[in-house]
Structure formats: structure tokens, C-alpha cells
Image (tube, rainbow, N blue to C red):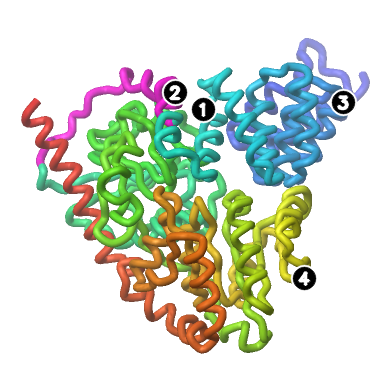
Amino acid sequence: MGSGEPAPGVAPEPEPSLPQALALMRSRDYAGAEQVCEGVIARDAAAPGPWELLGAIAFERGEKELARERFETALGLSGDRLQALCNAAEANRQAGCHARALELSARALALDPGHGPAMHIQGLALQSCWRMDEALAVYRRLVQQQPDVSRAYASYLFLLVLLGEDPLAVRAAHCRWAEVNAEPLRERGAACANTPDPLRRLRIGYVSADFREHAASSFIEPILAAHDPAGFETYCYSSTESIDATTAQLRALATCWRDVRWQDDEAVAGMVRSDAIDILIDLSGHTSGNRLGVFARKSAPVQLTYLGYPATTGMSAMDYRVSDALLDPPGAADGYYTETLLRLPHSLWCFRPSASMPEPGPLPALRSGQVTFGSLNSMLKLTPQMIALWSRLLLSIPQTRLVVATVAAGEARERIAAEFARHGVPAEALSIRAPLAREQFWSLYREIDIALDTYPCNGGATTCEALWSGVPVLSLAGALFQSRAGLSLLSVIGLPQLVAHSEEDYLRIARELASDLEQLSQLRQGMRERMRPSPLMDAQRFTRDLEALYRQAWRNWCGQVRHA
């Protein structure tokens, strides 16, 4: 009997198959799943299936380049199959190969012009290439044809906000999303049995996909640390996929931590009800990884949105939105939201900088002999309008240059550089930098004398980090929430004079700052002492104000129950 033959009466064990590998992947046994896939490949080298599964495993591990290579291998084996094209297109997009992503998504759409996932990938890749108008056109077609593709709709809504579209049109677009994707779910929500006592200790729940090294964490961490345990129990429902040291720090601050990465919205809504949460707080809005489906089911008596998104959710189940009077002046601004606004008395944000951020250091202009402006905001916030204004600024002030960060090499960088050149800015006056790790990113502030905020979508965490690095931020304020963040942040630390209300005002402030290096140096060296006692960094004061808003919302619900 050969060694490979089974004993008489014993059936041979079936060879491991792709369904087994998929089951192992879903149970997070990635090593086991990979081993099965490799066995399938050894038996059939021409099979694309195991390569697709290996690509999915790499995605879940956050290994984007490896995922790209594996999905490209699968595509080579399968030929132009629709799903294989979409998988490879998305893998290339996430790995930063945007031109290839556009090519593959176009090939997918040639097979099926109305394929939603391919259109979404194409729109996202166009954004990454700084082709915003084209991306918006793709999204418009997609949401008109398939309004129930919620993730793609979210990309469309966020781009409307980034581009500063008409606020009532933006509200209407969010309401259309909610009509299809949220309102039908509210009928499935169970009635809340919470005790309507306005004075009792409250159980509040924060819901986020960004409990990690992320801009939002620098704002939520001081609040979790400062909540009054006598009045509030804090539950965190985390959809965070990239668990890191920041996740562990935040987890230690919560009364109870729920990891809900693998639960669907229905299951999380049941969890919230079982936990008897009184006030449920969304920290994501329509950004990536949001759990608005949990809120659509009216999982808690009081639901509000805070911090993570600069527009309405559009949902009737979201009762309140937290803001401040500078971001959303009473009156017209109330009409831009489906939620009732709760305004904090000082600012929307409470900032706690990372301990890793370097000291400000001396003013760079004193060493270099020229004033360096800088924008370290997301590339997606750069607009042709702002580039035109920055070009006027550079050309009107001798011996100045501009550092623009977070723009990878490729089409986006070429298009942005060309836009500056079109306005007459010489190449030597512009330095465009690639995205960097956090510590390297922060070190850029040691090159920058004056930071330039973006418009119509201002920075938030980026502005706070610039200020903490000693760099004054020049901001242009508009009429909408997203164009008034700089106004709110600078006003709360006593620097409203750095906020312009017109383009001419912006240029004037820039010239005055650049002409007085002594003042710039004093601002830089004294910025941290200016920030520390302000409501922006006084976590106890800020959190008492926030808790007062929570309590106000709770009293309102209790009153409604009593009078029902």
C-alpha cells in the first residue's frame, strides 16, 4: 500500500477548499485561511478564487500593497470579469495607485455602465486625483440611479460639503439619503423603557469608527477623561478597525467598552437598548465607518450628533446636533439642519495635543530670511478658489514661499502645481510634500511661519495642531459651519484678528503678519500659554458645559414623556 493511500474502510479526508478558507477568514484565523488558499493554488495554479480571498485577507490586515498585488494576480487569472475588475480597482485606489484604479473602474463600467461599486470607486479615485467636479458628476449619476447604495451616497454628501454647495441644497440631499436609507428603519425600532427622571445619573453612549490614532481622538479623549462619574456613565461603541495604543487609552477611560466591529447595525441597536443607554452620541456623521443605521432605529430616547461631520445627518431619528454660536449663528443656520441645535457657550472643540508633538522652536524666518506660509490640511479641502487667493498672496509679498502637504506624487500633485503656475507662481516659491507619518508631519511646522487655512472647508484638528506648534493660522470665514471653524477656534483663544471676512481682508492680514517678524516670533513662543487656560484646552470647564447640554436634552425628553 502506498503511503498516500488511506487504510481500508477509511474514507480519505476532503482536501481543504475555498469555503473553508472563507470561514476561517471570517473567524479571524487569517493564517489558517492563507494556508488553505495556498493549498488550493498548489493544486490549481490557474484558479483566481484563492488569490481574491488572499487579497481580502490582506485588506483586513491593513496590508494595502499586498492586497493590491494579490487582486492584480486574481485579475490576471480571471480576465475582465466585473467583480475581479472592481476588486483590483479598489485595491489600487487604497494603495495610492489612482491612475490604475481609474483604468480598471473604466473597464468595469464598460461591462456594466450602471454598476454602483465601480462608479463609487471611480468617484473616489477622481477625488484623489484632484478632479472634484468629475467626481461630483459621477456621484450625482450614482445616487440618482441607486439611492440605496448608502456608502456611495455618503461620499457624495461629504463632497457637497467640502465644495461649499448651497446649504439648503446640501440639507435636501441629506434628507433624500435619509428618506431611502434611514426613515424605513425607524419603524423597526423598539420603544425605549428608560426611566424619565430628569435628575438621575445618565448612561451615555459614544459611537465611532475613529477610536484610534485619528484627528477625532484628540477631541474626544479629554471629554472621556473629564466626565463627571457621579452624573454620567460612559459607554463607547467602537467600530474601529485599526486598533492601536490610542484605542487602549480611550478604552481605559470609558465605564464600558463595546467592540462592535463585527456586529451589524441591527445587533448594535439591540445592544444599545439592552445597555439602557439614555443618550446616544454619533461622532461620525456621514464619514467612513459610520453607524447611522443604529441611530436610524432610534436605539436610545435621546440621540445627537457631535464633532465628526460638518453638516446635518438628514435623519428624523437624530434629535440634536451640538455646535456653537460662532459656527452656527442663531437664525438662518438653524434651517440648515434637520436636528435641533444645541450650542456650547464657547467652542465646539476641546483639544488635547499628543505628547509626541515637538516644541515650537524659533521662528523659521529669522533663520531663512524669508517668510514661509504653509497648509497642512487635507488635499481634498484644496480648491481652485483658494489656490487663486494664495497665489495672489505669494505674488504680493516679496521673498515668500508656500509649503503644501499631504499631496502624493502623481496626477493630483501635477494638477495642483499647474494651478499655481497658471496664476504665475514660480516653481521655486512652492513646495508640495507627500503624506507623512504623524511625527514627520508635525515637524513640518518647524519650517512654517504662518499657516493658511483652507476654504470653504476650514481645518479643525489641523488648525489646533498648527497653533500648538506655535504657528498662527490665517483663516477666511464664510457663512456656513464648515467655513467658520477657524473663526470659532481662533476666537476662543483670543486671536479673532487672524480671521478674515473677505479676500482683501485675508491679503491685508497676511501682509501685516509677514512684515512683523518680531510679532510673529512672540506669537510663536507664547501660543501654548495662550491656549492652555482657554476653553479649547480646559477639559473640566468644557465637559461641564457639554454635560449641561446633555442634561438639557434629557430634561426635554422627560417632559415629552410626562405630557404624552
Residue 472 x, y percent position in the rendering: 49, 73
Q: Callout 2: 10 Å neighbours few (<14), some, many (20+)?
A: some
* Residue at the image position 59 percent from the left and 56 percent from the top: 386
Residue kind at label 2, given as amino acid type: Asn
Tag 3 residue? 77
Comparing 385 with 381, the one in front is 385
Distance from label 3 to label 1 (Cα)? Answer: 31 Å
Distance from label 1 to label 4 (Cα)? Answer: 44 Å
Q: Callout 4: 10 Å neighbours few (<14), some, many (20+)?
A: few
**Mark 4 or mark 3: which is in front?**
4
Distance from label 2 to label 3 (Cα)? Answer: 37 Å
Instruction: Please tell me whether residue 184 is drawn above or below residue 487 in the rendered image.
Output: above
Comparing 110 with 216, the one in front is 110
Q: Where are the magenta residues, as a range?
A: 174-197
Q: In this view, does 2 lie to the left or right of 225?
A: right
Residue 113 x, y percent position in the rendering: 71, 18
Residue kind at label 4, given as amino acid type: Glu
- Tag 2, which secondary structure? helix
Tag 4 residue? 428
- Tag 3, which secondary structure? helix
Residue 150: mark: 1
**Mark 4 or mark 2: which is in front?**
4
Residue kind at label 1, given as amino acid type: Ser
Where, quadrant-wise, is the N terminus in this rendering?
Answer: top right
Instruction: Please tell me whether residue 55 is drawn above or below residue 533 in the rendered image.
Output: above
- Tag 4, which secondary structure? helix
Q: Which residue lies furthest to the left in this view?
A: 563
Distance from label 2 to label 1 (Cα)? Answer: 7 Å
Mark 3 touches mark 1? (CB < 8 Å) = no
